[in-house]
Image (cartoon, grey):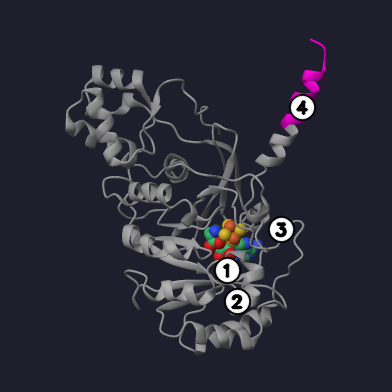
Amino acid sequence: MENPVQSSGARRNLVGLSRDEIAAEMKAFGAEAFRARQLWQWIYNRGATDFSVMTSLSKPFREKLAEAYVLERPQISQSLTSIDGTRKWLVRFPDGQEVETVHIPEEDRGTLCVSSQVGCTLTCKFCHTGTQRLVRNLTPAEIVGQVMIARDALEEWPSPQDDRQLTNIVLMGMGEPLYNFDNVATAMKIVMDGEGLSLSRRKITLSTSGVVPMIHRCGEELGVNLAISLHAVTDELRDVLVPLNKKYPIAELLEACRTYPGSSNARRITFEYVMLKGMNDSPAEARALVKLLEGIPAKVNLIPFNPWPGTSYECSSGTAIKAFSDIVFEAGYSSPVRQPRGRDILAACGQLKSESVKLSKAELLRQQSEEAQPA
Ligand code: SAH
Ligand code: SF4
């Protein structure tokens, strides 16, 4: 199923605008102030895609709005469903760039994995997204648009109070969210608004590879849960696996975690640790990890490495993962092993990488050959 193309000439898209922006837009449009609130609810709480359904607004006003504005989602260029129920949407923007959004249904929850950038400027060695050359920040509309297309597909409008299929959001898709903080923050404020998509900040987790100077702001301004992609216990190894470590080494990163606003034993910081065979998976490293985390309200999430075409890394053995997890658990930290989901559709952690670069190359070649042909 395809959505209409996004570019709509001079008409401005209202999807992705913050409360203040919609208020300013309506003021300039000559509408009374309370109209902005009504529009907000129609767009973000009821998921309206057309002004004609906004029955609390007069017909002439709806028509006037439709002449000036559109309500558009990004386009879905491909939609895949895994045998385990995980769904992956390839989402395309008007400039042809693409990102991936993944919905993971579980018994007691449904988590949406949202992208924050096209590609990623960081180059973690084990991550498929890090190999993508083309990179740009997503706009607030493109970030919140991913949540809205998922809600469309799950038929969850108006924002339900309970029995939801989309209960949690993790900013663990493509990109480094703290390198695009302002746009991520605008989008998450729309998501968290009680008259909007209405998901609590406690159900949102932002994962970062460790952009230390932004961590405090993230806690203060958004108050969402924090996940840190740690993956190594020494700077020597982390410099290799997560090159950002050269800029913000482990000690500085952990210090930022110690002072993360709102963290407590009831709201712990998640430390993600990808299990790479022979690289970072020894019992000694598990013990060193426990030592590093001392004094931080932490939980550990062990992620079996998800291979992708062309990688030279391998996933640790089941026995190594179990031994590692036991050591962390016995030290008093919860240490679940993340079950890989959607592997058959390349939707698991770290496998996301859009084909848009390849596509645009192919398109370029096609265009070149067409140009070479005499008319
Ligand atoms: N850029 C952010 C968020 C996206 S990645 C970050 O790095 O935290 C989400 C998680 O998947 C991170 O912990 C990342 O290190 C991990 N990951 C990346 N590639 C992976 C792979 N191939 N297998 C398993 N986990 C991977
Ligand atoms: Fe970027 Fe995260 Fe992948 Fe590292 S793991 S390259 S920060 S998306």
The answer to whether the residue labelled 3 contacts the one labelled 1, judged by CB atoms less than 8 Å apart, is: no
Ligand 2 sits in which quadrant?
bottom right
Whole-percent x, y for residue 102 in the image: 54, 51
Magenta region: 363-375
Q: Earlier in the sequence, mark 3 or mark 2?
A: 2
**178 sits to left or right of 58:** right
Nearer to us: label 3 or label 1: 1
Whole-percent x, y for residue 95 in the image: 57, 32
Q: Earlier in the sequence, mark 3 or mark 1?
A: 1
Q: Which residue is mark 2?
A: 235
Label 1 CA crowd tier, 10 Å (few <14, some 14–19, many 20+): many
Q: How many numbered marks have been drawn onto this rendered protein structure?
A: 4
Q: Which residue is mark 4?
A: 366
Secondary structure found at label 4 = helix
Who's the residue at 36% across and 49% down the image? 191
Who's the residue at 64% across and 50% down the image? 353
Secondary structure found at label 3 = loop
Q: Mark 3 to mark 2: distance in Å?
A: 26 Å
Q: Which residue is mark 3?
A: 308
**Mark 3 CB lies closer than 8 A to ligand 1:** yes
Q: Is residue 49 above or below residue 112?
A: above
Task: Kindly identify the amino acid type of the residue bearing the numbered disc 2.
Answer: Asp
In reply to whether residue 320 is colored magenta, the answer given is no
Q: Earlier in the sequence, mark 4 or mark 2?
A: 2
Q: Is residue 45 visible?
A: yes
Q: Find residue 339 and name its label.
A: none
Q: Earlier in the sequence, mark 4 or mark 1?
A: 1
